[in-house]
Amino acid sequence: MKGETLGGRYLLQERIGGGGMAWVWRAEDTLLHRPVAIKVLREEFAGDEQFVRRFGQEAQAAASLVHPNVVHVYDVGQEQATHYIVMELVEGETLKETIQRQGPMPVGRALQVAAAVARALQAAHKKGIIHRDIKPQNILLTPDGEVKVADFGIARAATGTTIVHTNTIIGSAHYFAPEQARGGFTDVKSDLYSLGAVLYEMLAGQPPFEGATPVAVALKHLQEEPVALRKRRPEVPRSVEAIVARLLAKDPAARYQSADALLGDLRRSLEEIGEPLGPDEGGEGETPANRNGRHQHPPKKRKRRIWPWIVLVIVLVLLGVGGAKAFTTWMTVPQVHVAKVEGMSLAKAKAKLHKQGLVAAKVGTEHNKAKAGTVVLQNPAPGDTVKRGRVVSLWVSSGPQKIAVPPVTNMTEAAAKASLTSFNFFPVTLHEKSSQTQGTVVRQSPGAGAKLVAGSTVRIWISDGPGQSQAAVPNFIGENYQTQVQPEMQALGLPPAGVTYAYSTTGAGTVLDQSVPPGTQVTSNMTIALTISKGIPPSGGSGPLGGPQQITLTYTGQGTADIQVWIVDATGTNIIYTNPTFTGSTPLVATWEGDGRIEVYAGTDGSTVPSIVYSQPLPVQGGEISIQ
């Protein structure tokens, strides 16, 4: 295409970049005699009428956004089968290239770049434009320090149609908000989450989550918490770590609700370290552009500072009534060391801070393993020295996030697994004979609508087609015999179990052991023997109610296995070890609260979801677990 002229005025000179959807060319606008950048859609997208129509609409909307921190869209056009966008040409490099070249950025500069991006988002959000693909590759840095955000509106055009040509997820999984990874509704808070991931990378030199595939990274955004920023880079101020943590909250309600609110905290953090807001401070409204597309900043009026005179008057008055000593005493504000309130209830935290003369303010709520209502983060941090009267921001746990289980009966096995995984559940597949179509889901446990903690196991039974009436034995261990096991055995058509009882630290009525291993196919007349807990013996019983315990896990099968080790206890479900290519032995440390059990899931080559191969109450007898 070099040497071609688009729209009768844009002369293509050289290709300077490209991505999954388009090539970027340096060109000359021969009408206005200025350099421009032109994004030309790849041929495979140019043939998709729905995509091209939406792409044009979004680009036109983005063209209305004029701001010094936004790459300006000048024109949108079509030359036969070639669709293109004409943009401001920004000299420099992308933020991604800068990080790759120099590693983590100075804290002040990282905050300045984040503030510039926040100002761009502030202007866009006021116009109802959501970016949806904030990432370092879309942030441009000029040699004189300017920051420009590119590709407003393009991500929305991309997600408005089904794109299979590139075999990739639209957007960048490393910077997805959890609601984007789940395919849910996105808004201004989704852009702010992505900016949080970018700020994390600027400061740590790497994104908050990494994985072998985009899907693996997206799932981490849904399920995991990133490594605390100060663990990767201790010199980062606690106030900055708190900003990043709030931006990366899983729950949109716990994040900053607007770019305005974020800019306030960024400004305060920059003041703490003695840095200005940035070379392009301000710029919330539109600025005029000259023929060369350069935004002209009107000269700022110099404001007369009145406060020094007010202070002088106060000093003179005080000197007149009490002298310099009285003035010094009046002006001195006592300092205190901030108490640690993390782990306390909100009421107790407020009371403790109030005794210190500090003001407690709840600024966010987030899903967390801690008990609901418990403070999980504070800023300033425990031990920091501040003046009395300082506001201490508190983030409070809303408890583990619970999600409604989706209905998957009558789906194919693959579709059911995909649906459960997208809702952040762990599907376990069992098989049974059924008159239902082979390969489809006969039933599920728990049923549709049940609310579980994210990461919980959901069993699905797959039809093996008609035949002798058989059932796959579930894993009853850890379940209540009366309320869970008996109804489930009845649904399977199995006769009542033969039961024996034993004292245990596990709650009364809980299944401790079963005679038939989970997953075994049995006929409808098969009786299964169960051992049921009688609870703690009258003497008070013995045995630990918590960890840690040293355990050796050994795999005796051929080749390697996809291994996951889970602890289920009073706090919920936690993965303590995972290895997709496990072989041999490895030491583990199991730590649990209250009654707990350990579960091991294993998958071999060709399996998409590991199956449970071991489930026993903690502590493990002998400290050895062997699987094959």
Image (cartoon, grey):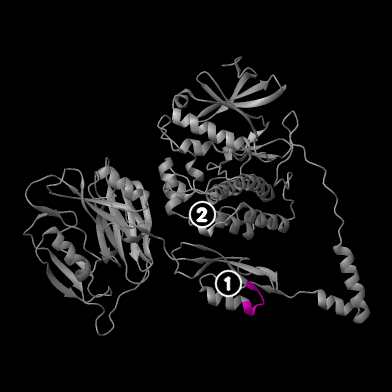
The residue at the point 49 percent across, 30 percent down is 53
Disc 1 target residue: 340
Left or right of 464 on screen, residue 33: right
User: Does residue 358 belong to the magenta stretch?
Assistant: yes
Question: What is the x, y in percent for residue 464?
Answer: 15, 45
- Assign a secondary structure to mark 2: loop
Is residue 20 in view from this perspective?
no
Q: CA distance from mark 1 to mark 2?
A: 21 Å
The residue at the point 86 percent across, 80 percent down is 326
Question: Can you tell which quarter of the image residue 268 is in?
Answer: bottom right
Label 1 crowding class (10 Å Cα cut-off): few <14, some 14-19, many 20+?
A: some
- Assign a secondary structure to mark 1: loop
Q: Is residue 314 above or below residue 467?
A: below
Question: What is the x, y in percent for residue 407?
Answer: 28, 52
Residue found at the very far top of the displayed protein: 3
Q: Which residues are magenta?
A: 354-359
Label 2 crowding class (10 Å Cα cut-off): few <14, some 14-19, many 20+?
A: few
User: Does residue 186 belong to the magenta stretch?
Assistant: no
Question: What is the x, y in percent for residue 210?
Answer: 47, 45
Residue found at the very far bottom of the displayed protein: 539
Question: What is the x, y in percent for residue 434?
Answer: 13, 49
Left or right of 512 on screen, residue 111: right
Mark 1: which amino acid?
Lys
N-terminal of the pair, mark 1 or mark 2, is 2
From the viewer's side, name the closer residue of 248 and 383: 248
Disc 2 target residue: 227
Left or right of 155 on screen, residue 566: left
Cβ atoms at labels 1 and 2 below 8 Å apart: no
Mark 2: which amino acid?
Val
In the picture, the disc for residue 144 is: none
From the viewer's side, name the closer residue of 47 and 462: 47
